Image (cartoon, rainbow, N blue to C red):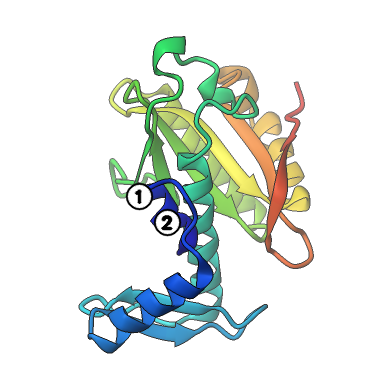
Amino acid sequence: MRQAYAFFGTGEPMPKQNLSRRLTQLTNGGYLGAETLHRGNNRRVYWPIARQYPIARRTLAHDLTVAHLSINLLSAGNAPILIHNRELPTHIATERRMWTQDAAASTTTHQADGLLWQPNNAAVIVEVELSPKTPTRLNTILRSHADRLESANDPAAHLLYLTTRTVGQLIARVWHKNGHAADHPGRMQIIHAVDDTTLGILSRFAPIPIPA
C-alpha cells in the first residue's frame, strides 16, 4: 500500500503511521473492507467495499505477490535487467508504463497474471509462478504464450516470468525443449524474484538462463 501511494502520488513513500491512519479512516468510513491473511506476518488485506475479495489463502497470497511485483515493474523504468526494455528507443525508455489485466483473445488462450504495457504500446505478458505445474499443464500454457508472441493480432511482444529459482529453471527447460526458445529468441525472460522457501519477494532479482 505504501508503494502504491508512492507510485501514484509524489514518488516519496508515505510514512507507515500516516498510512495506518489513512487506511483506518477509509475502513471506518465504509470505503474499504479489511481482512487478515494468516500467513507470514499476518498482513492485512484491503479491497473496495463494493467488490468484496473472496478470502482464499493460496489465491490471495498469489494475488498479493502479483500486486507487489506489478508495482515493481511499473517503477523499474528502463532497468537493463529486463530484456523488453532494451528494445525501446532512448527517448521513451524512461516513460511511464501501464499495468492491466490480461484479456484472452479466445477461450483457448491462457490468461496471464497481467500485461505490462510499454511506452511504445507493446505488451509484455507477465506470469507470477509460485509453485510448479504439471508437465501437461505447463506445456499447454507455454504453447499458448508462444502462439501469442507469433500472432500479428496480439499486442504481446515479450513474455516475462517472475518466479522461484526451482520453478524458473523448470520453465526454462520446458520452453527450450518444446522449441519455443528457437522460434522466439529473446522474447522470453525468466526472473528469480521469489524466495523458494518463504515465497516472499526478493530484494534483488536475478535472471534465470534459458538453454540455447
At label 2, counting other C-alpha atoms closer than 10 Å, the crowd grade (few under 14, some 14-19, many 20 or more) is: some
Residue identifier under label 1:
8
Instruction: Residue type at mark 1: give it.
Output: Phe
Query: Residue furthest toward the bottom?
Result: 28
Q: Quadrant of residue 94?
A: top left
Query: Considering the image in quadrants, where does the N terminus appear?
Result: bottom left
Q: Position of residue 88 (x, y in %)?
A: 46, 16
Q: Residue at x 45, y 20 (%)?
A: 93
Between 50 and 78, the one nearer to me in the picture: 78
**Relative to residue 18, is residue 130 drawn left or right?**
right
At label 1, counting other C-alpha atoms closer than 10 Å, the crowd grade (few under 14, some 14-19, many 20 or more) is: few
**Relative to residue 77, is residue 109 drawn left or right?**
left
Query: Considering the image in quadrants, where does the C terminus appear?
Result: top right
Numbered badge on residue 4: 2
Q: Position of residue 132 (x, y in %)?
A: 68, 57
**Relative to residue 80, is residue 154 drawn left or right?**
left
Q: Residue at x 29, y 79 (%)?
A: 26
**Relative to residue 117, is residue 58 drawn left or right?**
right
Q: Residue at x 49, y 40 (%)?
A: 75
Between 17 and 184, the one nearer to me in the picture: 17
Q: Position of residue 187 (x, y in %)?
A: 55, 24
Numbered badge on residue 49: none
Between 177 and 96, the one nearer to me in the picture: 96
Q: Residue at x 65, y 79 (%)?
A: 41
Instruction: Residue type at mark 2: give it.
Output: Ala
Task: Give the CA distance from mark 2 to mark 1.
Answer: 6 Å
Q: Position of residue 124 (x, y in %)?
A: 44, 33
| C-beta proximity under 8 Å, tags 2 and 1 | yes
